[in-house]
Amino acid sequence: MSLAAQGHAGRRSRPAGLVITYVLAGVLGLTIILPVVFGVLGGFKDTGQLADNALGLPHPWVVSNYTGILTSGLFWRQVGNSTLIAVGTALIVVGVAACAAFVLARFAFRGREFLAMLFAIGLMFPFAVAILPLFVLLRTFELLDNPFGVILPQAAFGLPVTIIILRSFFRVIPREVEEAATMDGCSTFRFFWSILLPMARPALATVSVLAIVITTPTGGRSRSASSSSRRSTRPTTHACSPTPSWRWSRRSRSTRSPSGSSSAA
C-alpha cells in the first residue's frame, strides 16, 4: 500500500474514532450530571412526592424547601464551621506534608525508608480504633467543642497519603536543578520555597483538593470532638439528624385507600 493510500485510510478512520470518543464522553458526563439534576429537583418536592413520584418533575414545586434552609442562621453557621475546618485541615496537611516529603525525598540519612514505611502503615490505621482514646485525649487538653479538636485529628489522619503523594513527586525532580541552584548560592530552604514548591504546584493542588474532600464528609470525627450545635458542621448535623419525613411518608402510604384518599381511623 502506498503512503498516499495509508494517509487517506488514516484520515477516514479518524472521524470514527472521534465519534466514539465523544459518545463515551457524553455517556460519562450524563452519569455524573443526572444524579445531581435529580438531587436538585428532589429538593423541590415534599415527602409525599418523593415517595410516589421520585423520578418525575415536582408538582407542585415546593420552593420553601430551599428558602427555609437558605434563610436559616443555623445553616450558615454550620457552613462556616465546615469551611473553617476544611480549610484549616488542608493548610496544616499540605504545609506539614510538604516539609516532611521534602526531607524524605531529597535527603539521604539512616532510617529514611523506615520513616516512609511508618507513614505508609498509617494508611491502614482505621479511625474507629482511635475514636475512644482520641476523645479522652481531646477532653484532657480541653479541645472538645473547639475547632482545633476536629482540625488536628483530621490533619493527622490525612498526613500519610499526602506525604506519600508529595514524596513521589519530589523524587522525580532532577538533581541537576538542585545542584544548579546551590551553585548560584541558593540555600536549602530557598530551593524548597522558591524552586521546588512552584514546580510542584500540580501535586500541591491535588493533595489540597484531596484533603478538603476527605475532610468535608466525615461526621464521626466531628461528633467525637463537638457536642453543641454551634460548633457542629454541616455533614455532622446531616448525619445526626432524625428522619421523620421518611417514616411519615411510609405511614401516609400505608394509610391510603386504593382510590387515593386517606382511610378513616
Image: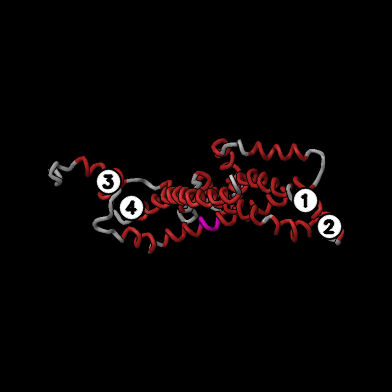
Report, in whole angstroms, how far the alpha carbon at label 1 lies from the one at label 2. Answer: 10 Å
State the CA–CA distance, disc 1 to disc 3.
60 Å
Q: Earlier in the sequence, mark 3 or mark 4?
A: 4
Residue of label 2? 180
Q: CA distance from mark 2 to mark 3?
A: 67 Å
Q: Which mark is residue 42?
A: 4
> Counting other residues with Cα less than 10 Å from the Cα at mark 2, is it few (<14), some (14-19), or many (20 or more)?
few
Q: Which residue is mark 3?
A: 51
Range of magenta residues: 81-85
Of circles 1 and 4, which is in front? Answer: 1
Relative to residue 159, is residue 125 depicted above or below?
Answer: above
| Residue 160 seen anywhere in this rendered image of the structure | yes
Q: Amino acid at mark 2?
A: Ala
| In front: label 2 or label 4 | 2
Amino acid, disc 4: Gly
Residue 123: which quarter of the image?
A: top right
Q: Amino acid at mark 3?
A: Ala
Q: Residues within 10 Å of mark 3 (few under 14, many from 20)?
A: some
Query: In this view, which residue lies farthest toward the front?
Result: 2
In whole angstroms, how far apart are the C-alphas of marks 1 and 4? 52 Å
Residue 61 versus residue 169 in the image, above or below: below
- Is there any visible trace of residue 236 in the rendered image? no
Give above or below for 41 relative to 157: below
Question: Residue 14: percent from the left, percent from the top?
Answer: 51, 50
User: Crowding near pointer 4: few (<14 within 10 Å), some, many (20+)?
Assistant: many
Q: Nearer the viewer, mark 2 or mark 3?
A: 2
